Image: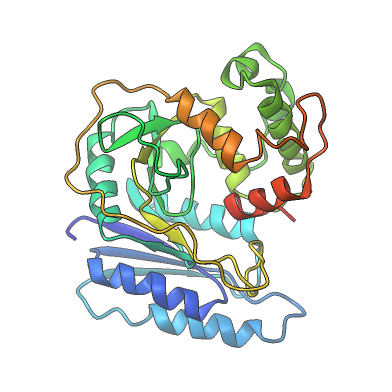
Amino acid sequence: MPDLAIALIIFNRPRHTAQSFACVRAQKPQKLFIIADGPRPGHQDDHQKCLDARAIVAQVDWPCEVHHNYAEQNLGLKRRVSSGLDWVFDQVEMAIILEDDCVPHPDFFGYCQELLERYKDDTRIWVVTGNNFQRGKRRGDDSYYFSKFGHCWGWASWRRAWRQFDGDLTFWADWKGSADWNKKMPDPLERLYWIDILDRVHAGKIDSWAYPWLATLWFNGALTAIPQVNLVTNIGVGPDGTHTVALEDEPGIPTQALGLLTHPTHIQQNTLADQYFFDHELGGLDKKFPRKYLAFPRRVKNKLVRLWKGLP
């Protein structure tokens, strides 16, 4: 695809990397940015697995400007992804971002490319995601709607947005509990839910770039374009996951064709869709999690692990 820049983030999972790279290869992007973390100390298999993953993405057999940012030592999830994306957006104005366990439908790329161009100067919109967690419920008549949730299993963004990323959450202590925070987080349960998580991120207890990015979006009132169907399957939940661990491989949400793009005439958050996501995917309706308590049932924590990487 002409004028398409893709950033692919890899680590130590060659069998996952092979699937995500095959999707990239099929698109033949003009620019390819490979971000790789290094082996972890004390993990004897990491060195060879990292080499195997890097060998897969070296198989570029189309005309392409390839850039590599390979860490020789392990930086960890937060530092590796955030520093890698800093490097990408130093070189391009907009890019599609995939991790090694994200397998997109072919429609994902055209959808991202069209929306990146359409909204490149619209500072209300910061993210285009390929993820949909609405369980088949359509939100409006167009191909996508707008959300406060910047789902990051296959997404795209602009330099203008990423440069606002605050990995240390320097605004958090003063912002939480403010009138603006309460307005943007009107559900008391959800408010407590995210305060618990973001407090731990701010204290350095969770190694995640995704939570600070999400909070940065909220702090700035940014919107994310979400497709009406799921366009990216996450295949990373399994026995060899780093932060998304399960006893056996889980298939992820299937993808579907999006088809011809139609665009919303009004740009505003779909609050019903966002409440549905919290209620049905993050445990907002769980009877074991009454609204007056901060305690999180194990099932809710497990869902968080699958939806936002970085939770211990």
Q: Residue at x 77, y 41 (%)?
A: 200
Q: Is residue 175 left or right of residue 138?
A: right
Q: Residue at x 55, y 52 (%)?
A: 82
Q: Up-down: is 126 above or below 308? A: above
- Front residue of 55 and 311: 311
Q: Can you give x and y, in whole percent of width and height, for residue 119 in the image?
A: 28, 34
Q: Can you give x and y, in whole percent of width and height, for residue 253 in the image?
A: 46, 57
Q: Quadrant of the C terminus?
A: bottom right
Q: Residue at x 42, y 24 (%)?
A: 269
Q: Can you give x and y, in whole percent of width and height, for residue 54 in the image?
A: 47, 80
- Front residue of 298 and 16: 298
Q: Quadrant of the N terminus?
A: bottom left
- The tally of labels here is 0
Q: Residue at x 45, y 44 (%)?
A: 135
Q: Quadrant of residue 180?
A: top right
Which residue is outermost to the front? 287
For the question of whether residue 48 can be seen, the reply is yes
